[in-house]
Amino acid sequence: MPHLVPLKPLPFAYSDDDGGRNLPDLDDEEFGHLTAVLKALARGSYPRLEAVPLALNAYNCNQRASPDANADADAEPLPWAYFYPITVVAPEDVPLRVRPIIDLDARITEDLGKPWCHVRFLCFIHKHKINRKATTQKGVHTISIWDREWDELTWHDTYHISRSSRRREIQRFWEFAEVTGFPSTTPREEFMERIRYRTVYHVAEHIEDTLRNAIPPRHTLWAVCAAALHHMNNARDPHVSIVPDKLELFGGQARGLLPRLFAHLLWLCLDARPEWGRGEQERFVGQCRILDRLAWMRLRTRHQLRMWRDRDREGEGSSDGEGDGERERERDREWVYDILRL
């Protein structure tokens, strides 16, 4: 396989002196979106929807073969996933007066047209309306993931209530969507026949049976994020679309899912503001402190933060000279653990 020429993960801009780090030049709006996701993860809440695809796209930045400490340093980076802004799917009982429009970034479709591209997955998070008397929340999230390797799209629905209705809604969505730059060469009729509908997810139903209470539909936002991260972490697996029906996936609790996303975004945000002094850094980290009740998140995030730190330190190597000790301590960022109280 030819060696991939390094490109920069979209949709971010980059400085010319990036040094190959894939460190995005985040503007204030982008930085605010990533911060919103960090705060939501730390508090067990939900960020504004427009922030979620950007945070998942940021996971591509500096993506390597594996974030594990024992990974092969010479291995090629994992293929990327590109996340389109969240789409709202019309309820099936509402006439479709306006066709859904998906306008893909031309740089993405250009890359997908190459024999060896960087992007394997195109991901579309959908918001569906639902009426459950047991909860006031009305939004269920599902995700469609197009896999370049197989030239087919798989739709994942992790919520058990009104699932058949959402399947009909997503069928209509893709049947009538006007998609600019979609790389699939399959005719629309054949494309529709090849869509895979993965609805064999029963964790939410089992949790409700156990608690004798409804799971808020909005929780599915984190479930589809976990499914997306599963794809990104296993991007060389030909059968990656078979997402396990496990609690750790539905809640994103596995340490390679939401805790890893948190660790990655936190280091990325600190690296993206090199002009900050220690006081500004500490104020930023302080607002991302994980609540005590999220014990699983605290424990697994600490593990991920240390793993990323150790890997980066090994990659930078060591040098001799005045001030090296201080720079080494700064790179370690041990103070972050004190601020986060991990």
Image: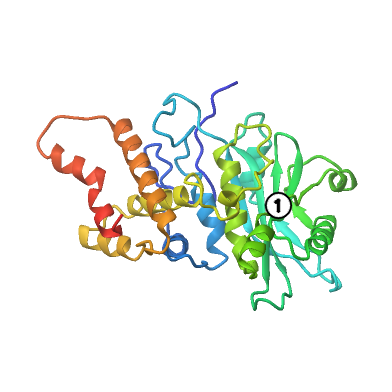
Q: Which amino acid is tagged 1? A: Tyr
Q: Which of the two residues, 27 or 136, is positioned nearer the viewer here?
A: 136
Quadrant of the image containing the C terminus? bottom left
On the rendered structure, is 230 left or right of 143? left
The percent coordinates of residue 52 (x first, y second) are 55, 59
Q: How is the image coloured?
A: rainbow
**Residue reaching furthest to the top:** 1
The percent coordinates of residue 108 (x first, y second) are 63, 45
Disc count in the image? 1
Quadrant of the image containing the N terminus? top right
Q: Which of the two residues, 100 or 72, is positioned nearer the viewer here?
A: 72
Q: Which of the two residues, 2 or 296, is positioned nearer the viewer here?
A: 296
The percent coordinates of residue 190 (x first, y second) are 88, 43
The residue to which callout 1 is attached is: 201
**Residue reaching furthest to the left:** 322
Q: Which of the two residues, 52 or 245, is positioned nearer the viewer here?
A: 245
Mark 1, Cα crowd under 10 Å, few <14 / some 14-19 / many 20+, is: some
On the rendered structure, is 240 left or right of 333? right
The percent coordinates of residue 2 (x first, y second) are 58, 22
Q: Secondary structure at mark 1?
A: loop
What residue is at 65 percent from the left and 55 percent from the top? 203
Residue 289 falls in image quadrant: bottom left
Above or below, 67 against 296 in this view is: above
On the rendered structure, is 342 left or right of 8? left
